[in-house]
Image (cartoon, rainbow, N blue to C red):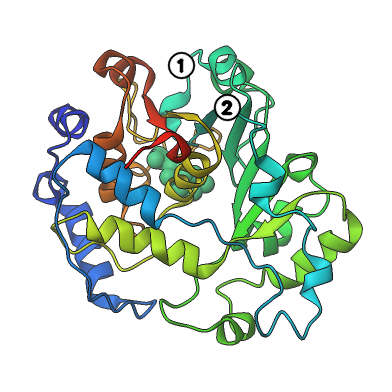
C-alpha cells in the first residue's frame, strides 16, 4: 500500500520497488536494445502548467503518410487513408476515455461512465464482451502493437475486435533508424498485414504511428524525469494518453495509475500475474505514470476509488 500511496502522491522512486523490479530495470538500462542516444536535459519541470505547455509544444502526432522513402516509392500515398487522423477527428469528440487493460478494472463497475464519453480508446486485444459492467462496450479507436498485427493467433484481419474502429498500429524502430532500415527490419512485420487490410477494408481508418512520434514521447518523458529511464519505447497506454490529449478537449484515463483495487493480475482478460505489468520492466512505465499523475486535474478520491485521472486536452492549454 505504501507504494500505491506514493504513486498517488507523485513521490514514488525506483528504490521503493521490489528488488526484482529494480533488477529488471537495471538490465534494461544496460542492454539498450534500441540504441537510444539522448543528449537533452533531464529533470522534473517546475509546475503543472509548465508541464502542459511543454507537452503542447512538443507533441505532434505523426503517422506514416507515404511522403517519405521507402513508402513514397512503394505508392503508400494511395494506400494510407485520404484523411489524416487529425482531419478525421477535428472537433468530433469532446470527451474521451482511455481504458487501460490492467487487472484492477475488474469489479470497478465503471462501464457506464466509460461509455458516456464521446470516444473510447482501448488497447491491443482487450475485449469488451463479457466485461461490459467494468469496461463498457463502446470502442472508437484501438492502438495495437506489431505483435497483435502480425501473429496469426490474434486473427487481426478478421476478428471483430479490430473492425468498425479507428486502428493505430505501432512497432518499435531503433531510436535513430531511418524508415528504410525500419521497413526492412521491423520488430514484427506489421507492413504486410497493413497493406492487406487496407486493400480488404479501405474504408476503415487505419494508420501506422511514425517512429519519430513514438520516440518524441520517450524524449518527453526523459526530459521531465531526473532518473535515467528505460531506453525502450513508451507503453501503448502512454502513447494512447498523449494521442487523446492531442485530439480531445478532455481525457479521462482509467486504471493507468492504479486504484485501491490494484492487483498483480496483469490484464483484466487474462489469468496472468506479474507486478511488472503495472510498474514496468521493459517500458518506462513507472515514469510514464509519475508524469500522468503530475498532470491530473481530478480529485484524489477519484484517483483512489476509480483509478481515474482527468487530463486537459492540449488545444485548450494556453501558454
Ligand atoms: O499490455 P498492454 O500493452 O496491452 O496494455 C495496455 C496498456 O495498459 C499498457 O501499455 C499500459 O500502459 C497499461 N497497463 C497498465 N497496467 C497493467 C496493464 C496494462 O498500466 N497491469
Q: Is residue 74 above or below residue 289?
A: below
Is disc 1's CB within 8 Å of ligand 1?
no
* Residue 281 in view of the camera: no
Q: Number of numbered discs present? A: 2
Q: Nearer the viewer, mark 2 or mark 1?
A: 2
Mark sitting earlier along the chain (2/1): 2
Q: Is residue 80 above or below residue 178?
A: above
Q: Which residue is mark 2?
A: 94
Q: Position of residue 172 (x, y in %)?
A: 50, 69
Q: Position of residue 67 (x, y in %)?
A: 69, 76
Quadrant hosting residue 216:
bottom left
Q: Position of residue 149 (x, y in %)?
A: 68, 59
Q: CA distance from mark 2 to mark 1?
A: 24 Å
Secondary structure beneath disc 1? loop
What residue is drawn where x is 51% and y is 33%? 98
Q: Residue furthest left?
A: 15
Q: Is residue 58 above or below residue 262?
A: below
Secondary structure beneath disc 2? loop
What residue is drawn where x is 50% and y is 44%? 246
Q: Is residue 21 above or below residue 252?
A: below
Q: Which residue is mark 1?
A: 108
Q: Quadrant of ligand 1?
A: top left
Amino acid at each position: 500500500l505504501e507504494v500505491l500511496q506514493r504513486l498517488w502522491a507523485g513521490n514514488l522512486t525506483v528504490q521503493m520497488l521490489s528488488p526484482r523490479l529494480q533488477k529488471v530495470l537495471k538490465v534494461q538500462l544496460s542492454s539498450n536494445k534500441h540504441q537510444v542516444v539522448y543528449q537533452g536535459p533531464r529533470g522534473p519541470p517546475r509546475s503543472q502548467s509548465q508541464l502542459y505547455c511543454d507537452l503542447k509544444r512538443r507533441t505532434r502526432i505523426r503517422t506514416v503518410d507515404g511522403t517519405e522513402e521507402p513508402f513514397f516509392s512503394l505508392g503508400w500515398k494511395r494506400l494510407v487513408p485520404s484523411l489524416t487522423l487529425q482531419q478525421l477527428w477535428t472537433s468530433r469528440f469532446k470527451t474521451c476515455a482511455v481504458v487501460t487493460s490492467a487487472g484492477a478494472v475488474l469489479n470497478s463497475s465503471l462501464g457506464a461512465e466509460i461509455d458516456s464519453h464521446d470516444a473510447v480508446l482501448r488497447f491491443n486485444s482487450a475485449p469488451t464482451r463479457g466485461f461490459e459492467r467494468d469496461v463498457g462496450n463502446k470502442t472508437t479507436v484501438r492502438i495495437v502493437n506489431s505483435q497483435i498485427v502480425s501473429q496469426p493467433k490474434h486473427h487481426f484481419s478478421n476478428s471483430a475486435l479490430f473492425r468498425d474502429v479507428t486502428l493505430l498500429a505501432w512497432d518499435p524502430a531503433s531510436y535513430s533508424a531511418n524508415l528504410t532500415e525500419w521497413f526492412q527490419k521491423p520488430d514484427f512485420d506489421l507492413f504486410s498485414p497493413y497493406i492487406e487490410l487496407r486493400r480488404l477494408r479501405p474504408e476503415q481508418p487505419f494508420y501506422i504511428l511514425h517512429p519519430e512520434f513514438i520516440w518524441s514521447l520517450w524524449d518527453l518523458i526523459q526530459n521531465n524525469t531526473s532518473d535515467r529511464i528505460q531506453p525502450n519505447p513508451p507503453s501503448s497506454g502512454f502513447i494512447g494518453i498523449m494521442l487523446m490529449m492531442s485530439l480531445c478537449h478532455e481525457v479521462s484515463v482509467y486504471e493507468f495509475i492504479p486504484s485501491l483495487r490494484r492487483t498483480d493480475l496483469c490484464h483484466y482478460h487474462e489469468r496472468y500475474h506479474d507486478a511488472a505489468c503495472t510498474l514496468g520492466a521493459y517500458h518506462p512505465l513507472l515514469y510514464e505514470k509519475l508524469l500522468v499523475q503530475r498532470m491530473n486535474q481530478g480529485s484524489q478520491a477519484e484517483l483512489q476509488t476509480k483509478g481515474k485521472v482527468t487530463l486537459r486536452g492540449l488545444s485548450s492549454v494556453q501558454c
